Image (spheres, helix red, strand yellow):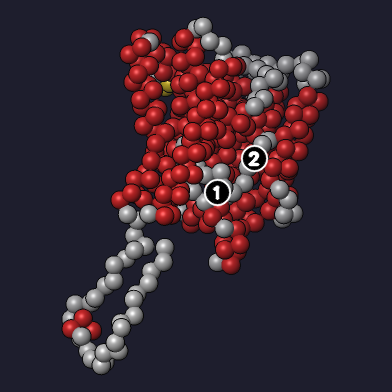
Amino acid sequence: MNETTPAPAVQAPARRTPAAQPGGPEARPADSSRPTGRQRAAELLQRQGVLAVLLIVVIASSFIYPTFASLDNARGVTIQASFLAVVALGMTLVIITGGIDLSVGSVFALGGVLAAWASQYGFLAALLVPLAVCGAIGLLNGLLIARGNMAPFIITLATLLGARGLLLALTDEGATTYLVPKDSAFGELGQGSVWGFGYPIIIALVLFGAGGLVLQRTSFGQTLFAVGGSSDAATLMGLPVARTKILVYTLSGLLAGLAGALNAARLSSGVTIIGVGMELDAISAVVIGGTLLIGGAGSISGTLWGVLLLAVIQNLINQIGSLNSSYQSVVSGGFLIVVVVAQRYLARSRRTT
């Protein structure tokens, strides 16, 4: 915003005003840089509007479908949402920096196959093998994007194909399905529960809590926003732009691999056909949650609400019964269009008010 002070029509003799006298009250010009009420409302709506929509949908559905409000249904919705939530958490960090990661769906599936295969060697192997391989894929993405100055869309599209190809090679084109041994500690990680809520739900909530603290309370989190706002300006400020990008893509790969491992533990097998299109679901959840695709703005909590909203929509389609699951894509796409248009309007409102 422009701050201008009109010049006086007649040059008055210089004299000390009461505001300039020692000990006198300091005259402060109106701070036009402070956000107005309309700007604050637009920012709040952009960040937490999805929560209001989620609450409305949940309340309305509870009245229409009595089984929707049951505790068993809530457990089912949240356990299914937990895997996407872990993937979307990494996607949020990437998008805040102005990037994109299209490989997470294939990395998710690869992590599940690797975890199921390694589970025969024990709990630690079942976790560390997928984390190591999937983290290496994320590291490769980050190095090529940050150090090689290559387009994130192209690089992560290439690793999407590479990870899916590696998965097919490990499973003989999908003919081999690795099973998690019965009564193993790794299987308990996916199927165990606390107060009826599965361990994957608890793990996802812990990760989101840690992610929120990192994003809002650490210098690394502020660096993410700075890099997403303007990579060139962040470089001039002396911020570690390349290192930050490498780290967020590595984290995205690690989280996708972890989600795949948890899903394998839940299903007791490494399913080869899962994860197709999961990257689009993760991007949709992040954008619906208020994170801007151009980078520089976003929140961890918004992504969580976006994931839950998509899960609730899927559950409602199942409750209706006469609709198949393909309608979820139609509804999700409609939500995404509305949110993107609303974000553009709200961003313009915040700039011009």
> Which amino acid type is shown beneath numbered disc 1?
Gly
Give the class, few, some or many, for how many residues have Cα within 10 Å of label 2's Cα (few <14, many ≥20). Answer: many
Looking at the picture, tell me which residue is in the foreground, 1 or 58: 1
* Residue lying farthest to the top in this orientation: 322
Residue 104 in percent (x, y) is at 65, 34
In the visual, does 6 lie left or right of 107?
A: left
Res 166 quadrant in image: top right
Q: State the SS at label 1.
A: loop
Q: Which residue is mark 2?
A: 101
> Which amino acid type is shown beneath numbered disc 2?
Asp
Residue 349 drawn above or below residue 209: below
Q: Which residue is mark 1?
A: 295
The residue that appears at 57% across and 62% down in the rendered structure is 234
Residue 342 in percent (x, y) is at 46, 39
In the visual, does 203 lie left or right of 144?
A: left
Does residue 100 appear anywhere in the picture? yes
Residue 298 in percent (x, y) is at 48, 45
Residue 304 - label:
none
Counting residues from the start of the chain, the first of labels 1 and 2 encountered is: 2
Q: Are marks 1 and 2 in contact (CB under 8 Å)?
A: no
Looking at the picture, tell me which residue is in the foreground, 132 or 319: 319
